[in-house]
Amino acid sequence: MKMPLFLFIFIAFSVISLMQSCQNNSTVKSATGGESNVIEIDSSEILAEEPLTAEQQAALTPDSILSILKKGNSEYINDSLTVRNSSKKIRKAALGQYPKAVILSCLDSRVPVEDVFHRGIGDIFVVRVAGNIINEDILGSLEFACKVSGSKLIVVLGHENCGAIKSAIDNVKLGNITTMLAKIRPAVESSADFKGNHTSANKDFVHRVCVDNIKLSTSNIRAKSPILKEMEANGEIKIVGAIYKMETGKVNFLN
């Protein structure tokens, strides 16, 4: 049995309309109480931000980049992250990179660094190591980010409830972890004047050691990298410390 021509045309038009609708909207589905809620995001609301160029990077200052990161963190904690056209940005950034800053973060999976500062592909370098410690490989990475690739801000980002900090306080001995924790121990020892229990069960003491460890890392950067120390002295870069609050997502920058 042949399909009537008018019915064939109607079906074809409906299919074309449906395809166009799908192209103009991205759909995110979530399940609540067994029922699916659909949120439609118009394609015009997707941020197709261009990767930073060398000229744009050169025009930035360490203080302006710090302000950008603070604003991004505010957007993160207020749940106003922008949907980004990552596929387009991947292709645009393929041939070069000019990140604004380099973040030395702890390994912890609960600290999604790019999201924390509302940054996308090509915006920041991220160096991750348990306890945000300093060693030769980390220093080399920071020097590459700043001296070679033009980043103008180094942020040493620690966080509350850090397992590496707690392990250093408890003086844990285990394989290569022992050597790693030895780099945090000076922060534990510098907190000797803390009033209260010096144990990993004391949140206030853990916080104190965490802050001292951030300061230790920023000091080690200056002491062990003449390149970065000179760049900071010349005003080309800034080296700052910050602590991430697990419960709120807020980043507090240290003086």
Image (cartoon, grey):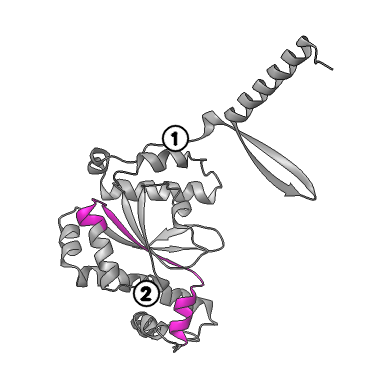
Residue at 69% over, 46% down: 30
**Residue numbers of the magenta segment:** 145-170
Q: Which residue is mark 1?
A: 48
Left or right side of 191 for 59: left
Depicted 17 relative to depicted 125: above or below: above
The front one of 79 and 35 is 35
Total marks shown come to: 2
Marks 2 and 1, how far apart at CA: 38 Å
Circle 2 sits in a helix, a strand or a loop, which is it?
helix
**Percent of width and height locating residue 191:** 38, 82
Q: Which residue is mark 2?
A: 213
Residue 209 drawn at (x, y percent): 42, 77
Q: Residue furthest front?
A: 1
Q: Nearer the viewer, mark 2 or mark 1?
A: 1
Locate the C terminus by quadrant. bottom left
Give left or right: position of 57 versus 156: left
Question: Helix or strand or loop: what does disc 1 sit on?
Answer: loop
**Residue 157 magenta:** yes
Number of residues whose C-alpha sits closer than 10 Å to that of mark 1, classed few (under 14), some (14–19) or many (20 or more): some
Asked if residue 150 lies in the magenta stretch, the reply is: yes
Q: Where residue 238 sits in the image (x, y, percent)? A: 26, 57
* Residue type, numbered disc 1: Ala
N-term mark: 2 or 1: 1
Residue 231 percent across, percent down from the top left? 17, 58
- Tags 2 and 1 touching, CB below 8 Å: no
Q: Is residue 250 left or right of residue 24?
A: left
